[in-house]
Image (cartoon, helix red, strand yellow):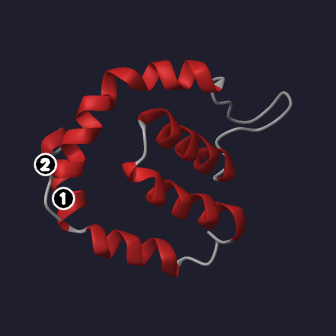
């Protein structure tokens, strides 16, 4: 299995291919597509705002279900705190040329 750096490089080297594939799948319409686009627009905003956009996207993608069953996301503040250690890594990844 390729290491993390190799996987990140592959994603960035093929970003257009990945985005094209995403937009070709008609299953991702409505709120899923809307919040995905909003998350991309939030890429250069402050850390908390960016995480709000990501959290909304994950919710629209079905990563949080109300009631007993299904996946559950952490409350937002716990999610935000869990991402703080990754903030510098995310900023570095944004600098990798496409």
Which residue position holds label 1? 10
Query: In the picture shown, does residue 32 fall above or below 43?
Result: below
* Residue 15 spot, x, y in % from top left: 28, 67
**Label 2 SS:** helix
User: Badge 1 local density, few (<14 within 10 Å), some, or many (20+)?
Assistant: few
- Residue 31 - label: none
Q: Which sits in the foreground, 88 or 27?
A: 88
Density class for disc 2 (Cα within 10 Å; few <14, some 14-19, many ≥20) is few
Disc 2 to disc 1, C-alpha distance = 6 Å
The answer to whether the residue labelled 2 contacts the one labelled 1, judged by CB atoms less than 8 Å apart, is yes
Q: Residue at x 25, y 30 (%)?
A: 88
Residue 91 x %, y %? 25, 40
Name the residue: 63% across, 46% down.
56
Which residue is at 42% across, 35% downward?
Answer: 47
Q: Residue at 82% of width from left, 35% of height from top?
A: 66
Secondary structure, mark 1, is helix
On screen, residue 95 above or below 92: below
Q: Is residue 20 left or right of residue 69?
A: left
Along the line of sight, which residue is nearer the eye, 85 or 70? Answer: 85
| Image quarter of the N terminus | top left
Question: Can you say whether 20 is above or below 72 in the image?
Answer: below
Query: Which numbered circle lies on residue 6?
Result: 2
**Residue 98 screen position, x and y as percent:** 17, 65
Residue 35 as seen in the image, left or right of residue 6: right
Q: Residue furthest right?
A: 67
The reply, left or right, for residue 95 in relation to residue 17 is left
């Amino acid at each position: 299995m390729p290491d993390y750096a190799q996987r990140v490089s592959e994603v960035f080297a093929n970003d257009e291919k990945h985005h094209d594939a995403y937009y070709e799948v008609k299953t991702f319409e409505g709120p899923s597509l809307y919040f995905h686009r909003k998350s991309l627009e939030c890429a250069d905003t402050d850390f908390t705002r960016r995480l709000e956009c990501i959290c909304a996207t994950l919710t629209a993608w079905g990563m949080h279900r109300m009631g007993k069953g299904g996946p559950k996301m952490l409350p937002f503040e716990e999610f935000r705190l869990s991402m703080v250690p990754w903030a510098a890594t995310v900023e570095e990844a944004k600098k990798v040329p496409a």
